[in-house]
Amino acid sequence: MAPPVFELEGTWEEILTWSFDLAGRRVRVTVLSSEPNAPGDSSPLEPKHRRMLALLDQWEQTRLTGEEIAILDDMEQYLKDHPVSLRRLDD
């Protein structure tokens, strides 16, 4: 099964952070205007936020096994039964 297609946008340095995930895959590079919000760019999001949205989109396209679905379905109850509390180490 071929990996899902997803779109990346950001600076060259940000795109390079994906190099491990993209190794061996076909890619297309389009160089955009240097303006952060060029005309026609309706996304006021910063590149790191667009990257997170791309990851979430990829997550949504990932097919889960029946066992994985069951685990995720039970996660809410598990967290209610086993509450997690976070604290700073220097507290």
Image (spheres, rainbow, N blue to C red):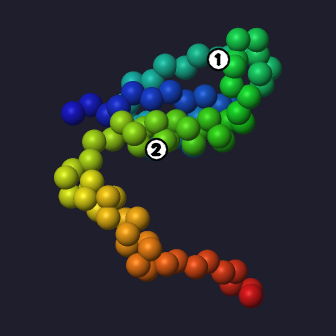
Query: For the view shown, which residue lies furthest in the right direction?
Result: 35
Residue tagged 2: 20
Numbered mark located on residue 31 in the image? 1
Could you say which quadrant of the image residue 59 lies in? top left
| 67 lies above or below 63 | below
Cα gap from disc 1 to disc 2, whole angstroms: 21 Å
Other residues around mark 1 within 10 Å, as few (<14) / some (14–19) / many (≥20): few
Residue 73 in the image: state x and y as whole percent: 32, 58
Residue found 55% across the figure and 30% down from its top: 8
Could you tell me residue 65's position as x and y percent?
21, 50
Quadrant holding the N terminus: top left
Amino acid bearing label 2: Phe
Left or right, 33 with respect to 67, comes to right
Q: Which quarter of the picture shows residue 82? A: bottom left
Residue 76 % position (x, y): 40, 65
Q: What element carries label 1?
A: loop
Assign a secondary structure to mark 2: helix
Task: Residue 66: give x, y in percent of width and height.
Answer: 19, 52
Residue flagged by tag 1: what amino acid is it? Val
